[in-house]
Amino acid sequence: MLKLKVQKATEFEKNVKATVQSTGRLGFSDGAKKKMKIETGKYLVIATNEEDSTDENLYAWLEDTADGGGFRINKGGEYYNANTKPLFDGLGIDYKDQENLIIYDIIDFNYEGNSIFKFIKRIHTRNKKNKKTGDNDN
């Protein structure tokens, strides 16, 4: 017997990511805003894996106060961000690279019984269609 279940696109989370801007700020997509319940007045606490120096992912959660050392959530227009420039400078992450863009896909993560978020790092090559090729037609 066969019973099919339609997998509706509207039932899945989409575009849940954070992008490192060229200013060092971490900008959140609308999907991330909804998933993480991001709002102004919250603080994003970010951790790294001190047991594995090759783990480039970040681990994060939101808190209501700055007591935990979190980065304040700011809002610019419709978008939310956190000024993470000092963090990325300290970690040696080159957010000013004109060739590549750093994006973190955000998923739920269980750490010692606590529900937090795992930011999975990926590198996206920027669109190069406007970049000069070095050809000189003159």
Image: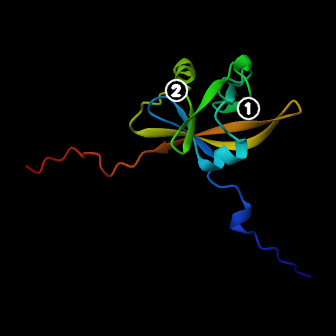
Nearest the eye: 19 or 79: 79
Residue 78 lies, in percent from the top left, at 54, 45
Kind of residue at disc 2: Ile
Question: What residue is pinned by disc 2?
Answer: 93
Residue 24 lies, in percent from the top left, at 49, 28
Which callout, 2 or 1, points at the residue further toward the start of the chain?
1
Assess whether mark 1 and mark 2 are in contact (beta carbons under 8 angstroms). no
Q: Secondary structure at mark 1?
A: strand
Residue 88 lies, in percent from the top left, at 54, 24
Question: What residue is pinned by disc 1?
Answer: 61
Residue at the bottom extreme of this rendering: 1
| Whole-number angstrom distance, CA of label 2 to CA of label 1 | 21 Å
Residue at the left extreme of this rendering: 138
- At a point 82% along the width and 74% down the height, the residue shown is 5
The colour scheme used here is rainbow
Q: Quadrant of the N terminus?
A: bottom right
Category of crowding for the residue at label 1, using alpha-carbon neighbours closer than 10 angstroms: few (below 14), some (14–19), many (at least 20): some
- At a point 48% along the width and 35% down the height, the residue shown is 21
- 120 shown above or below 127: above
Kind of residue at disc 1: Trp
- At a point 42% along the width and 33% down the height, the residue shown is 97
